[in-house]
Amino acid sequence: ASLGTVDGIVAALTALPGFTASAPVATTVGGHAGFAFDLTVPSDASACTDVGKVRLLDVGGPSNHDEFSINAHLRYEVIDVGGTPVLLEHYSFEAASRLAEVQQLVNSITFP
């Protein structure tokens, strides 16, 4: 699947080497369908990162990436908004249960 599609983005992120992904589940955000999944940073990532962090979604330069502590809990939702895939990324540096609070915010998103 193409990276320009929801399926392609989900497939690419859930297949990242070294990361563990939960099975994608159907979701809707603001009435738009897609998939949600969690990523777990490899437990041995500290051996190959810069100052105990891992970089993800590097899109062309040192300031164009996400950088997380190796103990971050990551959740992604990829939805289709009028034919355009939209990636929502949320994370917690505390217990994974804190993601439920962020999920409430995600559930309130609307699109014009």
Image (tube, rainbow, N blue to C red):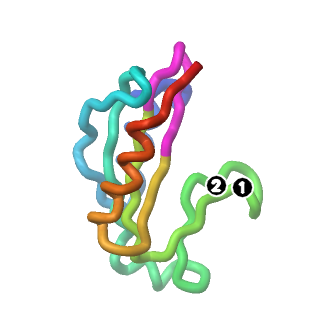
Which residue occupies the foreground of this view, 29 or 12? 29
Tell me the distance, in whole angstroms, between the alpha carbons under discs 1 and 2. 6 Å
Looking at the rendered structure, the secondary structure element under dot 2 is loop
User: What quarter of the picture does the C terminus occupy?
Assistant: top right
Q: Give the residue number, with chain letter if any, for mark 1.
A: 64
Vertical position of residue 88 compared to residue 110: above or below: below
Q: Residue at x 37, y 65 (%)?
A: 73
Q: Residue at x 58, y 67 (%)?
A: 67
Residue 24: in magenta span: no
Residue sitting at x 32%, y 46%: 37
| Vertical placement of residue 102 versus 54, above or below | above
For residue 52, side relative to residue 76 (left or right): right
Give above or below for 62 relative to 94.
above
Would residue 87 be counted in the magenta stretch? Answer: yes
Q: Position of residue 68 (x, y in %)?
A: 52, 69
Quadrant occupied by the N terminus? top left
Name the chief secondary structure element in magenta. Answer: strand
Q: Residue at x 54, y 76 (%)?
A: 53
The residue that mark 2 highlights is 58
Q: In this view of the protein, can residue 1 be seen by the observer?
A: no
